[in-house]
Amino acid sequence: MLAVLALVWPRLGHAESVELSTFSVVRGEEGVLLSFSANFELPRSVEDALIRGVPLYFEAEASLFQSRWYWRDKRIAHATRSWRLTYQPLTRMYRVSTGGLNQNFETLAEALDSLRRSSRWKLAEPGQVEDDARHYVEFSFRLDTTLLPRPMQIGIGGEAAWSLSVERTQRLN
Amino acid sequence: MTKPNRWGWIASLVALTATALVLFFLLSITTGNRAVYERHYAWLFWVNVVVAVLLVLVILAAVVRLQVRVRGGRFGSRLLLRLVGVFAFVGVVPGVLIYTVSYQFVSRSIESWFDVKVESALDAGLNLGRDTIEAQVKELGAKTLLAAERLGDAGAQVPPLALERLREQLSARDVAIVGTGGQILLAAGSASNSLTPDRPAPALLRQARSSRVASLLEGLDEDGSVGASLARVRAMALIPSNNFALGEQDRFLLVTQMLPPRLTANALAVQAAYREYQQRALAREGLRRMYIGTLTLALILAVFGALLLAVALGNQLAQPLLMLAEGVRQVAQGDLTPKPVFASQDELGGLTRSFADMTAQLSEARTLVQRSVDQLDSARANLQTILDNLTAGVIVFDRHENIDTVNPGATRILRLPMSAYRGRRLDEVPGLQGFANAVGARFESQAASREAGERDQWQDAFELQTAPDREVLTLLVRGAAMPQDARLLVFDDISDVVSAQRAQAWSEVARRLAHEIKNPLTPIQLSAERIAHRLSPKLEGADQAMLARSVDTIVNQVQAMKQLVNEFRDYARLPAARLEALDLNALVGEVLALYATAQEAGQLRAECEPGLPLIAGDATQLRQVIHNLVQNALDAVAERPDGLVRVHTEAARNEQGELRAVRLLVIDNGPGFSDKVLKRAFEPYVTTKSKGTGLGLAVVKKIADEHGARLRVANLGAAGVAAREGEPASAGAARGAQVSLSFSNFPPADRHAAASAVDVARALT
């Protein structure tokens, strides 16, 4: 609980402008699989920055914890996915890079659609999860402003429009 | 290390750290190492904030402390306040000035970066690039469509050669005929790396199917020159078919043309610049905030650092001054303990050192003065003791001739309460007017006629009678001038000395007279007797009687003169006493036997204590003493019918019963001695008797001196009790006189015998 609180607390001030329309963690034969679908629109100022050529970074982060009554909860697995969304004024294309993969989109909506959802994201191998222990997953999806140019970070300061994030903690059945 | 010092060090350290941080800060800005700067910005900022807060706290504490000190009127706090004020002013004002200028500069310069012209130029450049590329894309599309129609006209089968020719016409990289699904049916190309060109992108295929022709730009990726070299335009057009046979698929002509590398590179550069500019423009506010924040923080740090340094420096500077002032205050209050020294090599340290030295010297000087005052005091006490115990009289006059100091000797000699006249003139003392005038005149004459080299003192003898009924004192007076016009008068009562001198002179006169007078006496007497013897028978009657009478007179007078001469001789030429063991009682008995008539008449009585120890004496001389004393006493009582002379002997003992002296007393109940006589009783020719030479007591005195015996003469008081020694007898009330002679000289081996004799005598009684 403390760990959850510690994770949640710094974000409490942020506006919850992102909704998770679907979120599921499944423990199957392949391991622990996570599927989510985030629902959000880019605020005006963010979109403006994107059009002006500022790359936006989105990050999904998931951690699998094993509850322990005698000590801090043990983190079994940790996985992150990040997307880089850029706009090319020269070709008027939106480009999404994740890992080594690049995709070009004509419209912003298409580009956003490509990074809104993930399915069957493998968090842990089957052997990592003990059967008789209690586990839970902490998940967060957010617009990562720490990768913005530093002066911009200072400039946007505490503007609510830039704090796009959502968090979810779910027990693993 | 003292407390303020430690504070100063802490403050300096904090200020130093802060300055180092700010310097690092500024350095990263000036070197333009944005990456380093931006990476460290956040923590640097917070560290600076923390340092600033610390500084504020420290300064607040210092200010409050100073305020409390000033309020409390603590010594030196005003000086410290002023110093701090000056230093703070010097530190803060330039800082604020620089801050103001920098603030203006930063905000203006940031604004000036973002120019409308630059922005529109970038926009235009970007549009230019885009339009150029789009134009290329459209052109290729149009060309492709044209070529496709020509191919369609040519027939269903397209020879590869024609395709190659088409490629060259279009100056494309490769040309291909693809099926509906995008599969390559026939290809011709210059691409050496791949045998067949890439399949068309699905979007391109889709568009081509729907609108017969489509063109697309591919591979123009934003980053890297790799993309730029691969940038290509692809166009696809439907090849029209003349024979509408069923089952025949549509065919498309696919043309791939490379974009000129210069064009793509320039376009990409414009795009990168545009993007950069836009980002900067977006971050403008943040940048400004960052610079201003940095500046403000630097200002705060600098100001507070300056304040802290001001406090520390003020403390440092004020420290020796305060130390000095404190020391001065202590010295002013008379505290001459060693003062602390400020350990530094500069002038202030030297000042404190000199001050400490000065204080030490002062202290030493004061101790010296104290010591000399003590010495003076003890010397004065010494002098006073000496003066008090001096037999001579001492009087000191001040410059106004008032009596300044009188010692008890003066009071005793003058028999006047001299100390009561201290501060007054000498002639105000009753009975001393003449003396004062004489002394004054003597002083004046001494002062007036002083000769060079002469000692500034004089000496004179004065006869002085302080009261009519007192005897005349003979004073030997010595006067001397003292510093500051004071005068010293020392005098001795030399009456006794004069008396002794007189006795000496008399003895000399007597000796000569005796010698000169005695010789003619015998012939005179013999001649007179011979005249009587010869002329007596020849004369008769009245003549004979007259002769006999005259001769008798001559003989008697000569006899008397002989006696006189003998007495003189006795006095003057007393032989040296031959001391032998002698029984005083026996001697008294022997002498008194000569006065049998007086004893029988009850005028003379002997009261001898039996068993007296033997004394050392000359029997002949002592006999004369007793004789003289008894004769004197008898003479004194001769005119009284109840006159009585007692001759008394006794042994005087002290408290332990030890023998002290053997005493002979001759007591009469006559008129006693007058004061004047009492004083000079032992001088020759001092007598109360109408007849007699006055030599009796003088001889007695002389013999007593020879025997080492003590002679005392006293009048008896009204009660008939012997007046005590030293107590002057009341003049008119004398009921008699007493002469006592104490012998304390005993024969050497006889003391024991005498003591045993006393014991025997006691046993007998």
Image (spheres, rainbow, N blue to C red):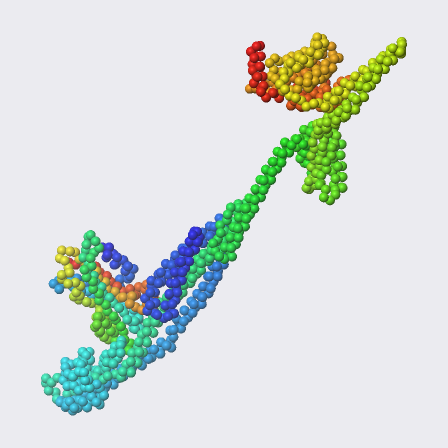
Image coordinates of residue B245 in percent, x first then y, are: 10, 87
Q: Could you say which is closer to the camera, residue B578 or residue B754?
A: B578
Relative placement, left or right, of B155 versus B16 is left
Quarter of the picture holding the C terminus of chain B = top right
Relative placement, left or right, of B511 versus B346 is right
Image coordinates of residue B201 in percent, x first then y, are: 19, 79
Q: In which quadrant of the rendered view does residue B270 lie? A: bottom left
Q: Residue at x 72, y 44 (%)?
A: B453
Q: Residue at x 41, y 71 (%)?
A: B109
Q: In which quadrant of the rendered view does residue B153 lie? A: bottom left
Q: Residue at x 71, y 40 (%)?
A: B456
Relative to B142, is B66 above or below?
above
Q: Could you say which is closer to the camera, residue B307 or residue B71?
A: B307
Q: In which quadrant of the rendered view does residue A75 lie? A: bottom left
Image coordinates of residue B141 in percent, x first then y, are: 23, 84
Relative to A53, is B721 above or below?
above
Image coordinates of residue B220 in percent, x first then y, are: 25, 79
Residue A112 visible in image: yes
Q: Could you say which is closer to the camera, residue B530 or residue B236?
A: B530
Relative to B316, is B334 above or below?
above
Relative to B685, is B3 above or below?
below
Residue B288 visible in image: no
